[in-house]
Image: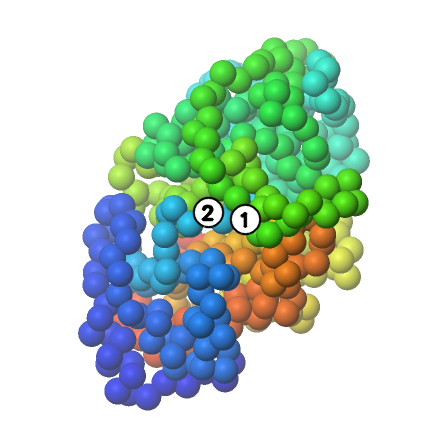
Amino acid sequence: MNIAYTKTYLLAIMIISTKVNADAQTKIRPDNFLQKIFSANPTHFDSIVAQKDTLKVQVIYTQIDRKKNNKPVFTDHFYHVDPQDYYYPASTVKLPVAILALQKLNELNIPGLDKNTTMITGAQGYGQTEVENDPTAPDGRPTIAHYIKKILLVSDNDAFNRLYEFLGQEYINNNLHKMGYTDIQIIHRLAITLTEEQNRQSNPVRFIDSSGKVIYEKPATKSAFVYSIQDTRIGKGFMRNGKLVNEPFDFSLKNRMSLQSLHLILRSVIFPEAMPKKRRFGLTKDDYAFLRLYMSMQPGESRFPSYDTGEYWNNYVKMILFGVDKKDPDPSIRIFSKSGWSYGFLTDAVYIADFKNNIEFMVTATIYCNADGILNDDKYDYSKLGYPFMKHLGEALHAYELQRKRKHKPDLAAMRFSYAE
Protein backbone atom coordinates (compact mmCIF):
# COMPACT_ATOMS: atom_id res chain seq x y z
CA MET A 1 0.00 0.00 0.00
CA ASN A 2 1.78 3.14 -1.20
CA ILE A 3 0.00 5.62 1.04
CA ALA A 4 1.99 8.09 3.12
CA TYR A 5 1.03 10.97 5.39
CA THR A 6 2.97 13.82 7.01
CA LYS A 7 2.47 14.69 10.69
CA THR A 8 1.00 18.05 9.68
CA TYR A 9 -1.51 16.36 7.40
CA LEU A 10 -2.54 13.87 10.08
CA LEU A 11 -3.05 16.69 12.58
CA ALA A 12 -5.23 18.58 10.10
CA ILE A 13 -7.43 15.53 9.63
CA MET A 14 -7.76 14.89 13.35
CA ILE A 15 -8.85 18.47 14.00
CA ILE A 16 -11.85 18.19 11.70
CA SER A 17 -13.08 14.90 13.18
CA THR A 18 -16.38 15.20 15.03
CA LYS A 19 -17.44 12.53 17.52
CA VAL A 20 -20.85 10.96 17.14
CA ASN A 21 -22.52 9.26 20.09
CA ALA A 22 -22.73 5.49 19.65
CA ASP A 23 -26.53 5.39 19.71
CA ALA A 24 -27.01 8.36 17.40
CA GLN A 25 -28.48 8.05 13.93
CA THR A 26 -26.09 8.65 11.07
CA LYS A 27 -26.72 12.14 9.73
CA ILE A 28 -25.00 14.00 6.95
CA ARG A 29 -22.62 16.41 8.65
CA PRO A 30 -20.49 17.78 5.81
CA ASP A 31 -16.76 18.01 6.44
CA ASN A 32 -13.67 17.81 4.26
CA PHE A 33 -12.05 14.77 5.86
CA LEU A 34 -12.43 12.45 2.88
CA GLN A 35 -11.53 15.27 0.50
CA LYS A 36 -8.22 15.54 2.37
CA ILE A 37 -7.71 11.79 2.05
CA PHE A 38 -8.29 12.06 -1.70
CA SER A 39 -6.05 15.11 -2.05
CA ALA A 40 -3.21 13.25 -0.33
CA ASN A 41 -3.42 10.57 -3.05
CA PRO A 42 -3.85 12.50 -6.31
CA THR A 43 -2.77 9.64 -8.58
CA HIS A 44 -5.66 7.49 -7.43
CA PHE A 45 -8.37 10.06 -6.75
CA ASP A 46 -7.92 13.31 -8.73
CA SER A 47 -9.87 12.06 -11.75
CA ILE A 48 -12.60 10.64 -9.48
CA VAL A 49 -13.00 13.93 -7.62
CA ALA A 50 -13.09 15.89 -10.88
CA GLN A 51 -15.98 13.73 -12.12
CA LYS A 52 -17.75 13.09 -8.80
CA ASP A 53 -21.12 14.24 -10.13
CA THR A 54 -20.97 12.23 -13.35
CA LEU A 55 -19.67 9.19 -11.47
CA LYS A 56 -22.30 9.61 -8.74
CA VAL A 57 -19.64 8.94 -6.12
CA GLN A 58 -20.85 8.71 -2.52
CA VAL A 59 -18.76 7.62 0.47
CA ILE A 60 -19.47 7.20 4.18
CA TYR A 61 -16.50 6.42 6.41
CA THR A 62 -16.87 5.67 10.13
CA GLN A 63 -14.03 5.84 12.61
CA ILE A 64 -14.62 3.58 15.60
CA ASP A 65 -13.21 4.38 19.02
CA ARG A 66 -13.78 2.36 22.14
CA LYS A 67 -14.52 3.43 25.66
CA LYS A 68 -12.78 1.73 28.58
CA ASN A 69 -15.62 -0.83 28.68
CA ASN A 70 -15.18 -1.49 24.92
CA LYS A 71 -18.39 0.36 24.02
CA PRO A 72 -18.03 1.83 20.52
CA VAL A 73 -18.15 5.53 19.70
CA PHE A 74 -18.58 6.43 16.04
CA THR A 75 -17.27 9.38 14.05
CA ASP A 76 -18.96 9.54 10.65
CA HIS A 77 -17.51 11.33 7.63
CA PHE A 78 -19.37 11.90 4.37
CA TYR A 79 -18.24 12.61 0.84
CA HIS A 80 -20.75 13.79 -1.76
CA VAL A 81 -23.59 11.91 -0.04
CA ASP A 82 -27.03 12.86 -1.30
CA PRO A 83 -30.10 10.68 -0.58
CA GLN A 84 -31.82 12.22 -3.61
CA ASP A 85 -29.06 11.15 -6.01
CA TYR A 86 -30.27 7.69 -7.01
CA TYR A 87 -27.92 4.76 -7.36
CA TYR A 88 -29.09 1.24 -8.15
CA PRO A 89 -28.39 -0.82 -5.01
CA ALA A 90 -28.13 -4.14 -6.88
CA SER A 91 -27.26 -7.02 -4.54
CA THR A 92 -26.82 -4.88 -1.45
CA VAL A 93 -30.59 -5.25 -0.91
CA LYS A 94 -29.88 -8.90 -0.10
CA LEU A 95 -28.45 -7.92 3.29
CA PRO A 96 -31.67 -6.52 4.84
CA VAL A 97 -33.70 -9.37 3.31
CA ALA A 98 -31.37 -12.00 4.80
CA ILE A 99 -31.65 -10.31 8.19
CA LEU A 100 -35.44 -10.12 7.97
CA ALA A 101 -35.67 -13.82 7.11
CA LEU A 102 -34.06 -14.64 10.46
CA GLN A 103 -36.27 -12.11 12.21
CA LYS A 104 -39.41 -13.64 10.67
CA LEU A 105 -38.47 -17.09 11.99
CA ASN A 106 -38.09 -15.63 15.48
CA GLU A 107 -41.46 -13.92 15.23
CA LEU A 108 -43.18 -17.15 14.16
CA ASN A 109 -41.71 -18.85 17.24
CA ILE A 110 -42.88 -22.32 16.18
CA PRO A 111 -41.26 -25.37 17.84
CA GLY A 112 -38.96 -27.12 15.39
CA LEU A 113 -38.91 -24.20 12.97
CA ASP A 114 -35.56 -22.49 12.59
CA LYS A 115 -33.08 -21.46 9.90
CA ASN A 116 -32.00 -25.08 9.40
CA THR A 117 -35.51 -26.46 8.82
CA THR A 118 -36.24 -27.78 5.32
CA MET A 119 -37.99 -25.09 3.25
CA ILE A 120 -39.95 -26.19 0.17
CA THR A 121 -40.92 -23.46 -2.28
CA GLY A 122 -43.98 -24.05 -4.42
CA ALA A 123 -45.30 -22.26 -7.50
CA GLN A 124 -48.70 -20.83 -8.30
CA GLY A 125 -48.33 -19.22 -11.71
CA TYR A 126 -47.06 -15.67 -12.24
CA GLY A 127 -43.72 -16.91 -13.55
CA GLN A 128 -42.95 -18.68 -10.27
CA THR A 129 -40.65 -21.68 -9.99
CA GLU A 130 -40.44 -24.48 -7.42
CA VAL A 131 -37.56 -25.62 -5.22
CA GLU A 132 -37.71 -29.03 -3.55
CA ASN A 133 -34.00 -29.71 -3.15
CA ASP A 134 -30.69 -27.87 -3.14
CA PRO A 135 -27.77 -29.87 -4.55
CA THR A 136 -25.29 -27.38 -3.06
CA ALA A 137 -26.37 -28.23 0.50
CA PRO A 138 -24.58 -31.07 2.35
CA ASP A 139 -27.81 -33.12 2.55
CA GLY A 140 -29.65 -31.61 -0.41
CA ARG A 141 -32.16 -29.74 1.76
CA PRO A 142 -33.05 -26.12 0.94
CA THR A 143 -32.99 -24.03 4.12
CA ILE A 144 -33.00 -20.37 5.13
CA ALA A 145 -29.52 -20.85 6.60
CA HIS A 146 -28.09 -22.22 3.36
CA TYR A 147 -29.72 -19.49 1.28
CA ILE A 148 -28.23 -16.80 3.51
CA LYS A 149 -24.83 -18.46 3.38
CA LYS A 150 -24.86 -18.39 -0.44
CA ILE A 151 -26.02 -14.78 -0.46
CA LEU A 152 -23.20 -13.64 1.79
CA LEU A 153 -20.45 -15.79 0.26
CA VAL A 154 -20.98 -15.11 -3.46
CA SER A 155 -24.12 -12.93 -3.66
CA ASP A 156 -26.30 -15.74 -5.05
CA ASN A 157 -29.35 -14.31 -6.84
CA ASP A 158 -31.64 -17.34 -6.64
CA ALA A 159 -31.04 -17.57 -2.90
CA PHE A 160 -32.18 -13.97 -2.52
CA ASN A 161 -35.27 -14.60 -4.61
CA ARG A 162 -36.28 -17.52 -2.36
CA LEU A 163 -36.06 -15.33 0.75
CA TYR A 164 -37.98 -12.57 -1.05
CA GLU A 165 -40.72 -15.14 -1.75
CA PHE A 166 -40.72 -16.43 1.83
CA LEU A 167 -41.10 -12.94 3.30
CA GLY A 168 -43.24 -11.24 0.67
CA GLN A 169 -42.98 -7.67 -0.54
CA GLU A 170 -45.16 -6.18 2.19
CA TYR A 171 -43.30 -7.75 5.10
CA ILE A 172 -39.94 -6.60 3.77
CA ASN A 173 -40.87 -3.00 3.13
CA ASN A 174 -43.26 -2.44 6.02
CA ASN A 175 -40.75 -3.71 8.56
CA LEU A 176 -37.90 -1.64 7.19
CA HIS A 177 -40.08 1.45 7.12
CA LYS A 178 -41.18 0.89 10.73
CA MET A 179 -37.51 0.84 11.67
CA GLY A 180 -37.03 4.25 10.06
CA TYR A 181 -35.57 3.08 6.75
CA THR A 182 -38.29 4.82 4.78
CA ASP A 183 -36.11 5.43 1.73
CA ILE A 184 -35.77 1.69 1.10
CA GLN A 185 -37.98 0.07 -1.51
CA ILE A 186 -37.36 -3.61 -2.33
CA ILE A 187 -39.99 -4.56 -4.87
CA HIS A 188 -38.54 -7.14 -7.26
CA ARG A 189 -36.56 -10.32 -7.53
CA LEU A 190 -33.07 -10.24 -9.05
CA ALA A 191 -31.58 -11.62 -12.27
CA ILE A 192 -34.93 -12.69 -13.72
CA THR A 193 -37.35 -10.64 -15.80
CA LEU A 194 -40.83 -10.39 -14.29
CA THR A 195 -43.60 -7.83 -14.48
CA GLU A 196 -44.60 -5.57 -11.60
CA GLU A 197 -47.64 -7.81 -11.01
CA GLN A 198 -45.49 -10.95 -10.92
CA ASN A 199 -43.13 -9.41 -8.38
CA ARG A 200 -46.10 -8.58 -6.16
CA GLN A 201 -46.97 -12.29 -6.08
CA SER A 202 -45.11 -14.50 -3.60
CA ASN A 203 -44.81 -18.26 -3.88
CA PRO A 204 -46.40 -20.64 -1.40
CA VAL A 205 -43.78 -21.96 1.03
CA ARG A 206 -43.87 -24.80 3.54
CA PHE A 207 -41.40 -25.97 6.18
CA ILE A 208 -41.17 -29.66 7.00
CA ASP A 209 -39.43 -31.68 9.70
CA SER A 210 -37.27 -34.80 9.24
CA SER A 211 -40.36 -37.04 9.15
CA GLY A 212 -41.95 -35.00 6.36
CA LYS A 213 -44.50 -33.34 8.64
CA VAL A 214 -45.41 -29.76 7.72
CA ILE A 215 -44.43 -27.47 10.62
CA TYR A 216 -45.45 -24.19 9.02
CA GLU A 217 -47.06 -23.24 5.73
CA LYS A 218 -47.25 -19.82 4.12
CA PRO A 219 -49.79 -19.59 1.30
CA ALA A 220 -49.21 -17.73 -1.93
CA THR A 221 -49.75 -14.03 -1.33
CA LYS A 222 -50.17 -10.82 -3.29
CA SER A 223 -48.63 -7.60 -2.06
CA ALA A 224 -50.73 -4.47 -1.73
CA PHE A 225 -47.67 -2.41 -0.83
CA VAL A 226 -48.01 1.12 -2.21
CA TYR A 227 -44.89 2.07 -4.13
CA SER A 228 -43.33 5.49 -3.78
CA ILE A 229 -42.79 6.23 -7.44
CA GLN A 230 -39.94 8.59 -8.29
CA ASP A 231 -39.04 9.77 -11.77
CA THR A 232 -35.52 8.35 -11.89
CA ARG A 233 -34.00 8.23 -15.37
CA ILE A 234 -30.32 7.59 -15.99
CA GLY A 235 -28.09 7.42 -19.04
CA LYS A 236 -28.65 8.40 -22.64
CA GLY A 237 -29.86 5.04 -23.93
CA PHE A 238 -30.34 1.36 -23.20
CA MET A 239 -30.47 -1.98 -24.95
CA ARG A 240 -33.80 -3.78 -25.22
CA ASN A 241 -34.14 -7.06 -27.11
CA GLY A 242 -30.80 -6.41 -28.80
CA LYS A 243 -31.75 -2.94 -30.05
CA LEU A 244 -30.65 0.46 -28.80
CA VAL A 245 -33.38 2.68 -27.36
CA ASN A 246 -32.19 6.30 -27.44
CA GLU A 247 -33.68 7.50 -24.18
CA PRO A 248 -32.68 7.31 -20.50
CA PHE A 249 -33.31 4.08 -18.63
CA ASP A 250 -36.21 4.33 -16.16
CA PHE A 251 -35.39 3.13 -12.62
CA SER A 252 -38.69 4.30 -11.08
CA LEU A 253 -39.86 0.71 -10.50
CA LYS A 254 -36.48 -0.62 -9.43
CA ASN A 255 -35.21 -1.36 -5.94
CA ARG A 256 -33.67 1.52 -4.03
CA MET A 257 -31.84 2.14 -0.77
CA SER A 258 -29.91 5.19 0.31
CA LEU A 259 -26.25 4.84 1.17
CA GLN A 260 -27.00 5.96 4.75
CA SER A 261 -29.55 3.17 5.22
CA LEU A 262 -27.14 0.55 3.87
CA HIS A 263 -24.41 1.85 6.17
CA LEU A 264 -26.69 1.73 9.21
CA ILE A 265 -27.99 -1.76 8.43
CA LEU A 266 -24.41 -3.00 8.27
CA ARG A 267 -23.71 -1.23 11.56
CA SER A 268 -26.76 -2.87 13.12
CA VAL A 269 -25.31 -6.33 12.36
CA ILE A 270 -21.86 -5.53 13.73
CA PHE A 271 -22.93 -3.31 16.65
CA PRO A 272 -26.61 -4.04 17.46
CA GLU A 273 -26.20 -2.83 21.05
CA ALA A 274 -25.09 0.58 19.75
CA MET A 275 -28.25 1.11 17.70
CA PRO A 276 -31.43 2.80 18.95
CA LYS A 277 -34.02 0.15 19.89
CA LYS A 278 -36.19 1.17 16.93
CA ARG A 279 -33.37 0.23 14.56
CA ARG A 280 -32.50 -3.13 16.06
CA PHE A 281 -33.67 -6.20 14.19
CA GLY A 282 -35.41 -8.98 16.12
CA LEU A 283 -32.42 -11.30 16.15
CA THR A 284 -30.76 -13.53 18.72
CA LYS A 285 -27.05 -13.55 19.59
CA ASP A 286 -26.75 -16.72 17.54
CA ASP A 287 -28.35 -14.96 14.56
CA TYR A 288 -25.85 -12.12 14.72
CA ALA A 289 -22.93 -14.54 14.99
CA PHE A 290 -24.29 -16.51 12.02
CA LEU A 291 -24.50 -13.38 9.86
CA ARG A 292 -21.03 -12.16 10.84
CA LEU A 293 -19.53 -15.58 10.16
CA TYR A 294 -20.70 -15.71 6.56
CA MET A 295 -20.28 -11.98 5.89
CA SER A 296 -16.56 -12.49 6.60
CA MET A 297 -16.04 -16.03 5.27
CA GLN A 298 -14.23 -16.52 1.97
CA PRO A 299 -15.57 -18.76 -0.84
CA GLY A 300 -12.52 -21.02 -0.64
CA GLU A 301 -13.30 -21.76 3.02
CA SER A 302 -16.72 -23.21 2.20
CA ARG A 303 -17.26 -26.94 1.68
CA PHE A 304 -20.99 -26.69 0.97
CA PRO A 305 -21.27 -25.11 -1.48
CA SER A 306 -17.81 -25.89 -2.82
CA TYR A 307 -16.81 -22.98 -5.05
CA ASP A 308 -14.40 -22.90 -7.95
CA THR A 309 -11.90 -20.34 -6.64
CA GLY A 310 -10.96 -19.46 -10.20
CA GLU A 311 -14.44 -18.04 -10.64
CA TYR A 312 -15.12 -17.14 -7.03
CA TRP A 313 -11.75 -16.10 -5.63
CA ASN A 314 -11.42 -15.33 -1.94
CA ASN A 315 -11.85 -11.56 -2.43
CA TYR A 316 -14.72 -12.04 -4.89
CA VAL A 317 -17.23 -9.81 -3.08
CA LYS A 318 -14.70 -7.72 -1.12
CA MET A 319 -14.35 -4.61 -3.28
CA ILE A 320 -13.21 -2.07 -0.72
CA LEU A 321 -9.52 -2.71 0.07
CA PHE A 322 -9.11 -5.56 -2.44
CA GLY A 323 -10.85 -4.53 -5.69
CA VAL A 324 -10.44 -7.55 -7.97
CA ASP A 325 -7.12 -8.65 -6.48
CA LYS A 326 -7.19 -12.44 -6.74
CA LYS A 327 -4.28 -12.98 -4.35
CA ASP A 328 -5.23 -14.57 -1.04
CA PRO A 329 -5.88 -11.75 1.44
CA ASP A 330 -3.83 -11.05 4.54
CA PRO A 331 -5.13 -13.65 7.02
CA SER A 332 -5.02 -11.08 9.83
CA ILE A 333 -7.68 -8.95 8.09
CA ARG A 334 -11.35 -9.89 7.88
CA ILE A 335 -13.94 -7.93 5.93
CA PHE A 336 -17.60 -8.21 6.96
CA SER A 337 -19.49 -6.91 3.97
CA LYS A 338 -22.19 -6.88 1.34
CA SER A 339 -21.49 -5.63 -2.15
CA GLY A 340 -23.48 -5.28 -5.34
CA TRP A 341 -22.96 -4.36 -8.98
CA SER A 342 -25.42 -3.91 -11.83
CA TYR A 343 -26.36 -1.37 -14.51
CA GLY A 344 -22.90 0.16 -14.07
CA PHE A 345 -23.36 0.89 -10.36
CA LEU A 346 -20.78 -0.63 -8.01
CA THR A 347 -21.50 -0.49 -4.27
CA ASP A 348 -19.85 -1.99 -1.20
CA ALA A 349 -20.52 -1.73 2.53
CA VAL A 350 -17.76 -3.06 4.78
CA TYR A 351 -16.64 -3.37 8.38
CA ILE A 352 -12.90 -4.10 8.41
CA ALA A 353 -11.21 -5.77 11.37
CA ASP A 354 -7.40 -5.88 11.31
CA PHE A 355 -6.51 -8.28 14.12
CA LYS A 356 -2.75 -7.91 13.72
CA ASN A 357 -2.82 -4.14 14.18
CA ASN A 358 -5.94 -4.15 16.36
CA ILE A 359 -7.87 -1.59 14.32
CA GLU A 360 -11.41 -1.44 12.92
CA PHE A 361 -13.43 0.89 10.74
CA MET A 362 -16.46 1.00 8.43
CA VAL A 363 -16.84 2.25 4.85
CA THR A 364 -19.80 2.29 2.48
CA ALA A 365 -19.30 3.60 -1.04
CA THR A 366 -20.88 3.65 -4.47
CA ILE A 367 -19.67 4.72 -7.92
CA TYR A 368 -21.27 4.70 -11.38
CA CYS A 369 -19.08 3.01 -13.98
CA ASN A 370 -20.70 3.62 -17.37
CA ALA A 371 -18.70 6.00 -19.55
CA ASP A 372 -20.78 5.47 -22.71
CA GLY A 373 -24.07 6.19 -20.95
CA ILE A 374 -25.72 3.08 -22.44
CA LEU A 375 -27.33 0.65 -20.02
CA ASN A 376 -27.94 -3.08 -20.49
CA ASP A 377 -25.12 -3.35 -23.03
CA ASP A 378 -22.78 -5.17 -20.62
CA LYS A 379 -20.09 -2.60 -21.38
CA TYR A 380 -19.39 -1.16 -17.98
CA ASP A 381 -16.19 0.24 -16.52
CA TYR A 382 -16.00 -1.82 -13.34
CA SER A 383 -12.47 -3.12 -13.98
CA LYS A 384 -11.04 0.15 -15.28
CA LEU A 385 -12.75 2.51 -12.86
CA GLY A 386 -14.89 0.98 -10.12
CA TYR A 387 -12.71 -1.78 -8.69
CA PRO A 388 -9.54 0.36 -8.57
CA PHE A 389 -11.45 3.14 -6.82
CA MET A 390 -12.79 0.77 -4.18
CA LYS A 391 -9.36 -0.81 -3.66
CA HIS A 392 -7.56 2.53 -3.32
CA LEU A 393 -10.28 3.91 -1.05
CA GLY A 394 -9.85 0.98 1.32
CA GLU A 395 -6.06 1.21 1.19
CA ALA A 396 -6.03 4.95 1.93
CA LEU A 397 -8.37 4.62 4.90
CA HIS A 398 -6.57 1.55 6.24
CA ALA A 399 -3.26 3.46 6.04
CA TYR A 400 -4.80 6.36 7.94
CA GLU A 401 -6.27 4.04 10.57
CA LEU A 402 -2.85 2.45 11.13
CA GLN A 403 -1.52 5.84 12.25
CA ARG A 404 -4.60 7.10 14.09
CA LYS A 405 -4.19 7.34 17.87
CA ARG A 406 -6.71 5.58 20.10
CA LYS A 407 -7.17 6.02 23.82
CA HIS A 408 -8.38 2.44 24.22
CA LYS A 409 -7.54 -0.51 22.02
CA PRO A 410 -10.60 -2.42 20.82
CA ASP A 411 -11.39 -5.92 22.01
CA LEU A 412 -12.21 -7.64 18.70
CA ALA A 413 -12.84 -11.11 20.16
CA ALA A 414 -16.49 -11.05 19.04
CA MET A 415 -15.35 -10.69 15.43
CA ARG A 416 -13.07 -13.74 15.44
CA PHE A 417 -14.50 -16.93 13.95
CA SER A 418 -13.39 -20.43 13.07
CA TYR A 419 -14.03 -20.89 9.38
CA ALA A 420 -13.24 -24.61 9.21
CA GLU A 421 -16.17 -26.66 7.90
Q: Secondary structure at mark 2?
A: loop
Q: Residue at x 49, y 61 (%)?
A: 54
Amino acid at pointer 1: Ile
Amino acid at pointer 2: Tyr
**In front of the other: 183 or 421:** 183
Q: Which mark is residue 234?
A: 1
Which residue is under mark 2? 86
Say if mark 1 contacts mark 2, CB within 8 Å.
Answer: yes
**In front of the other: 98 or 184:** 184
Q: Secondary structure at mark 1?
A: strand
Q: Residue at x 50, y 82 (%)?
A: 43
Asked if residue 284 is positioned above or below residue 321 in the image, the reply reads above
Percent x, y of residue 371: 61, 63
| Left or right of residue 141: residue 235 | left
**In front of the other: 120 or 30:** 30
Residue 134 appears in the rendering: yes
Q: Quadrant of residue 163?
A: top right
Residue 290 appears in the rendering: no
Percent x, y of residue 127: 73, 22
